[in-house]
Structures are given as C-alpha cells and as structure tokens.
Amino acid sequence: MTKKNPNLTAEQKLILFEEGTETPGSSELNYEKRDGFYHCVNCDAKLFESKTKYESGSGWPSFYDSLKDVFETKTDHHLGYARTEYHCKSCGGHHGHIFDDGPAPTGKRFCNNGACLVFKSK
C-alpha cells in the first residue's frame, strides 16, 4: 500500500493514485524558470533538475530527462493506444507520460502533471 501525504488536495490524489490528469495550462510550474529541482508532492523525492525543463507547448511542465532511477514505467491503453506512463519509484504516485518527441540530447518528453510536483529553488 502506498503511503499518502495527508495534505494532498483532491486533484493531487486523483492524479497520483487514480492516474488522472490536470487541465492543460493550469499549472503555475509551466512558467517556472529558476534553477532548482522538482520533487514529488507526495513523498518529496527529487525527480527533475530545472536545466532539463523546456517549453513543449503541450500545456504541462515538460522535461527531456529525469534524475537517475526515480521512476518506474508501465504501458497504459486508457486512450485506446499504448503510452508509456511513469510513476515515482519512492511512493508509486502517477506523474505523467513519456513521449519520443522531445529535444536533444534524449529525444524524450516527460509530460508531467504540475499538481504532482513541488519546485525547490537552489
């Protein structure tokens, strides 16, 4: 059983533990430009470094790489086709999907629900 942070909002619980999705363009983290790290809102695991964040035009905070060994993946077919879904390895919380349309050097786009992230500046 995944331990849930008692301070999570209903939206965060829906996204993290029922694999929901926030409305595109709704996260203030889309506009975050400072140096720092993005952490899991549930367990505080450090997931992304700000230097890997970029504007994908998708409406969700996007990163071309994550920190090493912080996610587990699985295939989901919720929309009728296969997508790679990723979850925080520490707490099991769903964060988003990985696509192969990102920039160099990885070519990946980690499309993350901003409601599931906490930004901490350096």
Image (tube, grey):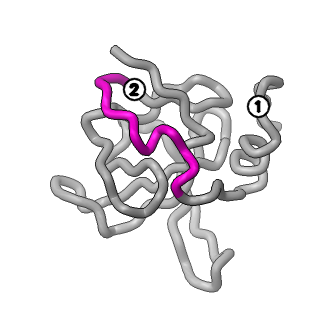
Between residues 59 and 38, which one lies in front from this camera angle? Answer: 59
Which kind of residue does numbered mark 2 sit on? Answer: Phe
Q: Does 31 sit above or below residue 109?
A: above
* Quarter occupied by residue 76: bottom right
Image mark count: 2
Q: Residue at x 42, y 54 (%)?
A: 110
Local packing at callout 2 (Cα closer than 10 Å; few below 14, some 14-19, many 20+) is many
* Quarter occupied by residue 32: top left
x then y, percent, for residue 113: 56, 49
82 displayed left or right of 99: right
x then y, percent, for residue 13: 78, 42
Q: Does 8 sit above or below residue 122?
A: below
Label 1 residue SS:
loop
Res. 37 mark: 2
Residue at the spot of label 1: 8
Which kind of residue does numbered mark 1 sit on? Answer: Leu
Q: CA distance from mark 1 to mark 2?
A: 20 Å
Q: Which residues are magenta?
A: 25-36
62 displayed left or right of 11: left
Label 2 residue SS:
strand
Q: Quadrant of the C terminus?
A: top left
